[in-house]
Structure formats: structure tokens, C-alpha cells
Image (cartoon, rainbow, N blue to C red):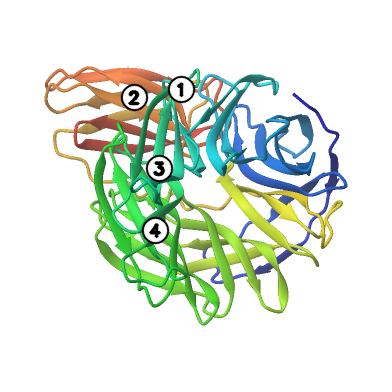
Amino acid sequence: MHSKHFLSVELILTLSLLVGSAFAQPDLNWSHSYGGAINDVGRGVTFNLEGDIAICGDVSARGGLNPWIMKLRSEGDSIWHTQFGSEEYEDMPWAIVACPNGGYTVAGRSQQLNPPTYIFTISKFTENGEVTWERAYGEPRENGTPYSIMADEEENYYLAGHRRVPVDDINYADDAALMKVSSDGDLIWSRHYGANIGEHGNNAMRTSDGGFAIVGDAWIEGSDMLTPIAFMTKVDQDGNLQWMRTYGDTAVGVQGRAIIELRNGCYVLGCDSYNNNWANLTLIWLTSQGDSITSRTYFNDFLNYTVRMMTLENGDILVCGVKANPYEPSDFWIIRLNPDGDIRWEVSYGGRGGEEMYGACLSPDGGVIAVGATDSYGNGTREYSDVWVIRTAPLPIDLSTPILPALPRDYQMVDLFPNPFNNTAVTRITLPGVKPGSATLYDVNGRMVWWSSLRGTPAATQEFRLDGANLPVGRYQLVVKQGDYSARKAVVVIK
């Protein structure tokens, strides 16, 4: 394990455009740069129950790329920094998740030299930044990269991305990939999915039914290899394929970059679509089975790259990414849309150099935390970048008419009292039938913070208590499931 001193400089520059006045765009709470005299890039971001922020990234050192993890206070001040990885290989982290039982887990790739390929890696850290264990998965020539990591209530981890798999004794092709490992890093199962010439998984999420959605780029027979189309793969909780769909026109390149699930079980796929050398934001609304409902394309005269999508409690959609044009440097970019896809506002953050966003999440108080690289601030130059992290103020949300799904007649969340609550709230639920169910509390980043099993007794109202003593102030979603039934309830914790 190695350590490195990081210089923290606070600088703020905001360039914004207000579109509509019903929902004010957020102020920038703070921005910080971190780095030394060489190239530093931040790639993933998460936070723990205390509200501390953790980011992962890489630094150019020892002749290659080496990964690091850093913990920050909610105001952006550095608590600790740990550099890890191999002395012999080039390692790059791509995603980080806060563990349900404390600490952090980072997913990335490690370059193997003979033959020169990449394999999946995962590293577990304590809350103080000490390495608990590190694992690598894959065989020579697989050349895989995980871009997403997720954790379940038992602290199993799921790595999603792409891997090169053998077509025959000589040839290989890229497939979307999903891997499950235990809390100790042991491989439980590994799956790959492909129906075309190649699939490149760019992002993934856990779905409300306990399964997963993977999105990315696909190349189909007869298409130009420079113009992929978007794809989405839906699998169950054991990684078994349920369906795979492709979207877009092979005459125009379309790349699937991000995915969100709506409260009615449908999805919105965020894509980069290319037309006359411009990269445009395209959103595609999908049914629960992946059939296209409608699509919209935005900003035809810019270079826009989607990094992450999120949903707010009122059904609004956030898209985070990078915005640029041929005459100006790139900036961090956030756009907010209503549930129908109409723009409420867009805002960009950056300086005279260029900024590239690689990761984003919702903060406990409902703002946005984004991480990437800057050429404008700290030690950033045209040749070398610094890590850049920004945090916005909470996004205003009108909860006077919350959007909640319709429940079956015999499936009722009878009461949640009090709400908002401080230490304890009491919830009463009636389940239909005799199948057991579960109740799970998720934070605004989609991370599970509490779970309870529910008995399957006909027409019986069950009561359980939510303990909020150790939960940070913020908004949560209580999700109750039994078989095909599901219900959600907005929960607010105050102090």
C-alpha cells in the first residue's frame, strides 16, 4: 500500500443557462481540485451513511496508471488517501460503492502483459482506507473492463461491463458481462451476453425486481464498425438472460450510456447519438420488456456525452455528463427534465481549460456530487489534469403531489408514522397471499441502507419499525415487494 500527498484547492466557476422558472437550478456548494504535479483523474464517487464522500481514480506514476481511493468530508476536505494496485501492471479503477457494513469496494481493470489484455479487479477497503483484500478475475485474452459495481444486502458484489469471449479456437468477440462475487471476493458466478457481432457494456443498475439492467453499444451484422447502435440487456437476480434489445439506426452511431427505472416499471435509456460529427443527448423511453415507446434528442449543435442518469422523488430526470463545442473547452454538465422529457434547466461548470466528468451521484441532501478531471484548476494544465469534484446545493422538489404507483387493492401500505421522522417510524403493511415479502430502504443513490423480511400470512397486517438514528438527513425510498407486487413510499429523515 502506498500513500501520496494531495493538494486541495477550492475554486468555483459556474456557467449556467436557466430554462424555465418552475424549478430553480441549484447553486454550487463547493468545488475542489486534488492532485500533484502529474496526471490525476477521478472516475467514481459514492458516500456513506455519515455523509462522507469517497472517490476513486488513477494517477500516472511508475510508468503507468495506478489506482487510488480518497475519503472526503461532506465539505470536500480530504480525510485520507490510499494508493493501491500492482507495481508491475497498469491498473485503472472505474466504479466505487459504499459497503452495507462499512468500508468501500472499488471495481476496475488490471493490464496483463502477456498477452497485453485487461482483466476485472475488485478491491475492498475499511472505513479508514486500509486494504482488506484484492482480487482479479479472468483469463488471458479476455480483455474486460467493469464500469459499474453494485452491492446487495448480504454484501455480495456485482461487477458489470464487457469481456472478450472466445467465438472459436482463434477468434474472440466482446460481450456484455456481469459477475457476482462474495463479501470475501470469491467468484460466485460469471455471465456474458451477446446476440450480435459484439456488445460493449457501459453502465448497469439493479432493478426493482432484484435483477439487473446493462446498457451499452452493439455492432450488428452488416453495419459499419464505426457506427454502433445502443442495446439494453435485462437479467434476473442470478444473471440469467431475460431479454436483450437494440435501439437506433446503423446509419447514425448510437451509444447506450446510462439507464434509470421509472416507478411504473418502465425504463429511460440515455444515449449519445452522432449526427454530422455532433454528439447529441438522446433519451429513449422503454416498456418493462424493453420495447421502445418514444424517444427525444436534445442539443443538436453541441458535443454532449452522457455519464449518469438519476430520478428524483417527483419523477424528474437528471442527466449528468460532459458538454462542449468545437470552439470552447468541455465542462461538467447537468440537465434536469420533467417526467415527460421537457427541459426544466441545464447548467455547466468549468474554467478556461477543459473538464471531463466520469462519475456522479445524488448526495444525501438531494444535491449532485460529480467527479472527473480538470485542466483549469489546481495543478491542471493542458498537459496534466487534476481530480475535480463538485457538489451542488439540494435540488428543489415539489412534494405536494408526490408520484406514487397504484397499488393492488389487496396490497396496502396502511401507515408510516411519523413521516418525516427522526429516530423511529412505524410502518404497517398488508400483503396479499401467503408468499413472503421484503421491505427495503434505499438512499437517493439507490444504495440499500435497511432491509427486513415480511411474513406471508393471508390478510395479516404486519408492523415493523424503521430505525433512523444512524441515517443522515435526507430523502429515501421504502420499497415493499412480494412476488410480482411492489410498492414504494417516500420517506424523509430529519434531525
Picture coordinates of residue 107 (x, y %)?
55, 35
Q: Check the image and report above or below for 132 versus 234.
A: above
Label 2 sits on residue: 427
User: Visible in this render: residue 24?
Assistant: no
Q: Earlier in the sequence, mark 1 or mark 2?
A: 1
Give how far apart the Cα atoms at labels 3 and 1 are.
20 Å
Of the pair 44 and 223, the residue shown nearer to us: 223
**The residue under label 2 is which amino acid type?**
Thr
CA neighbours of label 2 inside 10 A, class few (<14), some (14 to 19), many (20+)? some
**The residue under label 1 is which amino acid type?**
Glu
Of the pair 424 and 199, the residue shown nearer to us: 199
Q: Check the image and report above or below for 18 versus 387.
A: below
Give the number of the mark in front: 3 or 1. Answer: 3
- The mark found on residue 177 in the picture is 3
SS for tag 4? strand
Q: Residue furthest bottom?
A: 276
Which residue corresponds to the image point at 88% horizontal and 47% vertical from the top-left?
37
Indicate left or right for 339 with 486 as reference.
right
Picture coordinates of residue 105 (x, y %)?
57, 29
Picture coordinates of residue 188 (x, y %)?
38, 24
Label 4 sits on residue: 269
CA neighbours of label 1 inside 10 A, class few (<14), some (14 to 19), many (20+)? some
Q: Earlier in the sequence, mark 4 or mark 2?
A: 4
Q: The N terminus lies in which quarter of the figure?
A: top right
